Amino acid sequence: MALADQAPTGARINPAAAPGRSWIERIPPGWWIAVVVLLAMPMVANNFWLFQVMGWSFILGMIAVSLTFLAGYGGMVSLLQMSIAGLAGYMVAILGPSGTTSISLGLAWWIALPAAFLVAAIFATLSGALAVRTEGIYTIMITLAIAAAFFYFTRQNYTIFNGYSGFNLVLPPRLFGVNWRDPVPFYYLCLGCAALCYGAVVYISRSPFGLALQGVRDNPRRMAALGFNVTAHRVAAHALASVFASVGGILLVWQNAQIAPGTIGIPAAIDILVVAVIGGLRRPLGAFVGAFIYVILQVFSPDVLGVFGFSAERFKLIIGLGFLAVVLFSPDGVLGLWDRWRARRARRVDPLTGAPR
Amino acid sequence: MDKFARNHPVWALVIALLVAVFLWLVLAPWPAELEAAVGRKRIFLNALLGGITLGALYFLVASGFTLIFGLMRIVNLAHGSLFLLGGYIGYEITTYTGSWLLAFPIVFVVVGLLGLAMQRFVFAHMEGEELRQTLVSIGLSVVLADVMLWYWGGQSYTTLAPAFLRGPVELPLISSINPTSGEAIFIRYPSVRVWILVAAIVIGVAMWLVLNRTSLGMLIRAGVDDREMLAASGVRIQLVFLAVFVFGAGLAGMAGVVGGTFQSLSPGEDTRFLLASLVVVIVGGMGSIVGAAIGAAVIGVTEQMGLVYAPTYSVVFTFLIMAAVLAFRPQGLLGAGR
Amino acid sequence: MTLTRPDDRPAQMNSGNALELRGITKMFGALAAIADVTLTVRPGERRAVLGSNGAGKTTLFNCITGDFPATSGIIRFFGEDVTAFPPYERIRRGLRRTYQISSLFAGLTVIDNVYLACRGVSRNRYSLLRPRTDDALVHAAEMLVEAVHLTAVRDRLVGELAYGQQRQLEIALAMSGAPRFILFDEPAAGLSPTERRDLVAILTSLPAHIGYIIIEHDMDVALRVVESVTMMHNGRIFKEGRPSEIEEDPEVQELYLGGGHG
């Protein structure tokens, strides 16, 4: 199966791979540059860039990285991650304060937020338990069907989800006297959450749970013959991935200040898959790279399309064709292209002198 | 049948009772108390017939989907796009030539050719890579959806049924008893829908016959059960794949013409019918035509009954059926055990 | 998930048999792959199962581990009825197996493969914390890698290993986490003469309390590492005895040893 080719590899148990150097010294210089650029960005970038482009990229990236975790490490391509993110967002709107006062309970953030994570995790566990009843390619169909059912349900249900209109005026709590929806604080909030999610996925991939998940992906039957309960492991992965998706979903609600069924529709669910695949399912970083590319295209393609006399709606065509190109020609995504380009460049360098041939 | 009754006497009794109650509900005039409790029998019959007709449409779309999956393990998520494209083309043909019937062969050929191109130039190159094929089909559905939106816009179209199919037809089902004259009043139902049902049954029976009574059908069924064996037997399996893909795509296109006639066509209908196919096939079982028929009928009737009797939760019923099937019989009602 | 942790339980005191099969039958459709197999193996006993291809040897293993549950019959493992248990519950009770075609995790390193095998029968299978360098299981995994002579390739991806090395890793996985009984499915298949000698050394140096059943076509390997032999034919047991008896049995010689079924 194609997944096996795209499988992230190289999980090493031994944390002291390079003896004598602390973990800080082992971080490659490219990462330091990225950290500095990201931290310093508010000094040069305008509010639109910080809030709309970067904030949205981080949010999409977090939802997509939950899919990367399931698909890349667990071999389960789930189209449910947007629904889970949306449910967490809905829960924040329903339990916390919103403009729809007839439904929203207006609970304090320290109750509403944990409850939102919990409800999303329960939903993810139950639907995950259904999806792992069958193997492989069925997962994608079953999760798509569940995502659709949830979308139609939110649209038809007015007592809990407020139907078509959903909830508006869903704002983040005013902690430490900061308005977290101001562009700069929101940027740092998203950056911090995204870094945590990314770090957690990388860390967990080399923990016993993460290693076992990769074992389940590569060879479920053998995993059972080593004493692992494969089904339970898969369901647990769904539950764990829901945490990353929920963080993204809650931030998304705060960014838009509203949530409605359209947020979790089928096109949105597919967009998450598109984002993760364009970036590359091989590595967690791919989710964020894919999200950035997607957001850039989404935000700036209307202007470019307008120049050539096309409607802004043709953005979908560009995304679709780009997605097709990636799947057809670089199944491990943009990051895979990058890896291959670097490998080719390294080969061109003379191994003895280091000079280009 | 006998075996089932002998092995599960209690279940057999329960099923027999349910069937009897159902038949009584359909055939007998309802007493006043029942009508007072759940509403007019006419509403019930209309929902039931509507569900079965909808199920017929679902069957036309889903049967191609299930065959393609069963044989090639391709989850073609662009199947709904083929449905919508067929509907639009059918609308254009009917509008320009004035002939509704002419739309069917043309749409079958055009959409079938598109399916041929998809299988020949895309899917065949990544055989065995199930996930990649699925991803490609998602990409195709996104592209097709936007191209169709580009050309046909966001408004909704309804194809006009030909004159001989317009108007209602009286069915031999009692709707109610005229309280004054004591005469039975029979249900009247749009004739185009009746014909859609008849056509779906004819196509379904024909498919079943081809699959079970011809050598091509034997090949396809052997392939659904064991693809390696078929590949090893020296049959030119690519040709079989191509034929099934073309047929499945063409059928989805023709279903689009039908859907455009008795419902309407607009962006988003592709996703709706893709999802219907998914649920039908999950419930009925992958690769089984009879399973698709049963699944389609169950889902269609559930959807319509839900709309009439519990509009808020109609989606939930459909979903609960799917969840129950997955929980207790993950391979689907008639799917091969694995 | 069960609330009681079976792997924490003290070893079950038992009737005296490591493995006890009663009337095991496995049907594939109308075809009986194995029929009415009854077999007992004492703790620490080492036994070979011989027979031509299609005799049902591997199917027997699949029934014992639960990879493919038996159609009928009863399986007791150290006195406990495990017939209805899923594979992982049987493994957690000390049963292990190797596969005829190496069944490994190609995308992980050698040490990670062995570490997973040690994890599978330990607690904290769901731990999200990375193991520390002094983790007991990491140490156990290192020891196993050394025991099967794979230390030189411990950080290589398993997909890149030579065939013989994969076979050795296969054995390391089966030896992980205090096994009580191991099923070896043709461990010598495809190995060079030197590698076969290594294999015999590994098998004979297993702690005495670990019993095993070995399926093997190479009589030189099979008869040197076991104390009893079971012959299977067409899914049934037709002879049991000591290696010397089996070797000299005219019927057996007729069927296998002389028949060129290497």
Image (cartoon, coloured by chain):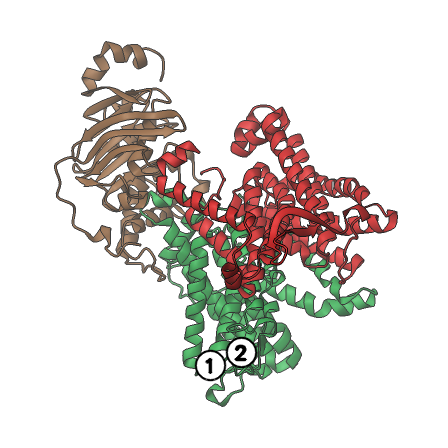
Chain colours: A green, B red, C brown
- Residue A105: which disc? 1
* Placement of C229 over or under B12, stated as above or below: above
- Image point 20% across, 34% down: which residue? C19
Q: Residue at x 62, y 56 (%)?
A: B178
* Mark 2 vs mark 1: in front: 1
Q: Secondary structure at mark 2?
A: helix
**Earlier-in-chain disc, 2 versus 1:** 1
Query: How far from the left and from the top, in percent, is residue B60?
Result: 65, 44
Question: How many residues crowd around disc 2 within 10 Å: few (fewer than 14), some, or many (20 or more)?
Answer: many
x, y percent for residue A284: 51, 60
Q: Position of residue B226 (x, y in %)?
A: 52, 31
Residue A94 horizontal side relative to residue C181, left or right: right
Q: Is residue C77 above or below residue A91?
A: above
The image quarter in which residue A64 lies: bottom right
CA gap, disc 2 and disc 1: 28 Å
Relative to B94, say whether A86 is above or below.
Answer: below
Residue C95 falls left or right of residue B283: left
SS assignment at label 1: loop
Residue named by callout 2: A188
Q: Nearer the viewer, residue C98 or A136?
A: A136
> Is the residue marked by circle 1 packed among few (<14), some (14-19), or many (20+) residues within 10 Å?
some
- Residue depicted at 63% across the width and 41% down the height: B64
The residue closer to the viewer here, B20 or B65, is B20
Residue B294 sits in quarter: top right
Please state the chain letter of the residue tagged with numbered disc 1 in the rendered image.
A
Amino acid type for the residue under numbered disc 2: Tyr
- Camera-nearest residue between B324 and A7: B324
